Image (cartoon, rainbow, N blue to C red):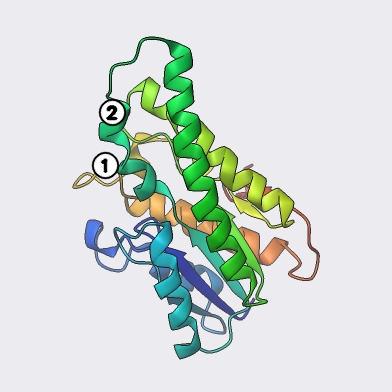
Amino acid sequence: MGHIVLMGDSIFDNAPYVVEGTHVQARLQSVLGPADRVSLLARDGSVVADMLEQVAKLHTLPAADWLVVSCGGNDVLGLVGAMQSKVASVIEAAGMLADWQAGFRRDYRRMVNLLLSRRTPLALATIYDSVPGLAPGLRTALAPFNDVILREAAVHRLPVLDLRLVCDHPDDYAAVSPIEPSSAGGAKIADAIAQLVRGQDPAARHTVVYGPARTSSS
């Protein structure tokens, strides 16, 4: 495993929303142990376009053995207002979603290609959809964006951390900001990342979808 770099947004950079020492980076470091290193380039509020800056910072770190990326949720969040627009038909609404999906696909594909140019094992994360209070319509509207992530992973034979499966309980979300991972959710995310980097052979280019980490009772 060696050196794992967490990139993206507040899914990984959740320290401001939880008790000190219980954020994703700290939990992952404790799970992997002192022989491994966990670096955090993810920044709260980042969108896909911000990944260019994060990639540029990789040269300031020791060579990475894994890049794990969770990004895209804030891009969708920026569309929530537009999603409240009135339309004349379901087909019209689907067409608007298709347009937004196409823009997201263009930007996400560019990001993936940039990350692949680093020639470092790469894992992508989906956007979770069990945020407390999330309207069913908005939850459904997330599906086209997650479809982009899963398709890009499959095209490039990359492993996927499916956060929809990992953070599936209200307690997984922070009380101070329900769109962020809580200490419990962060622990589940960190454990799932550990399972991915331990279970996935970096040299074996094939897509495996990782959900919650296995426990001794599962």
Query: Residue sitting at 51 percent across and 68 percent down?
Result: 31
Mark toward the start of the polypeptide (2 vs 1) = 2
Q: Say whether residue 178 is left or right of residue 150.
A: left
Looking at the picture, which amino acid does disc 1 mark? Pro
Query: In this orientation, which residue lies closer to the viewer: 69 or 85?
Result: 85
Q: Which mark is residue 199?
A: none
Q: Say whether residue 174 is left or right of residue 98.
A: left
Q: Say whether residue 140 is left or right of residue 79.
A: right
Residue annotated with mark 2: 133
Q: State the separation of the CA atoms marked 2 and 1.
A: 9 Å
Query: Residue sitting at 62 percent across and 49 percent down?
Result: 214
Q: In this view, does 91 lie above or below 211?
A: above
Figure quadrant of the N terminus: bottom right
Residue annotated with mark 1: 178
Label 1 SS: loop
Q: Do the residues labelled 2 and 1 touch (CB within 8 Å)?
A: yes
Which x, y percent locates residue 200? 72, 62
Which x, y percent locates residue 158? 69, 57
Q: Is residue 80 above or below residue 45?
A: above
Query: Residue sitting at 29 percent across and 58 percent down?
Result: 45
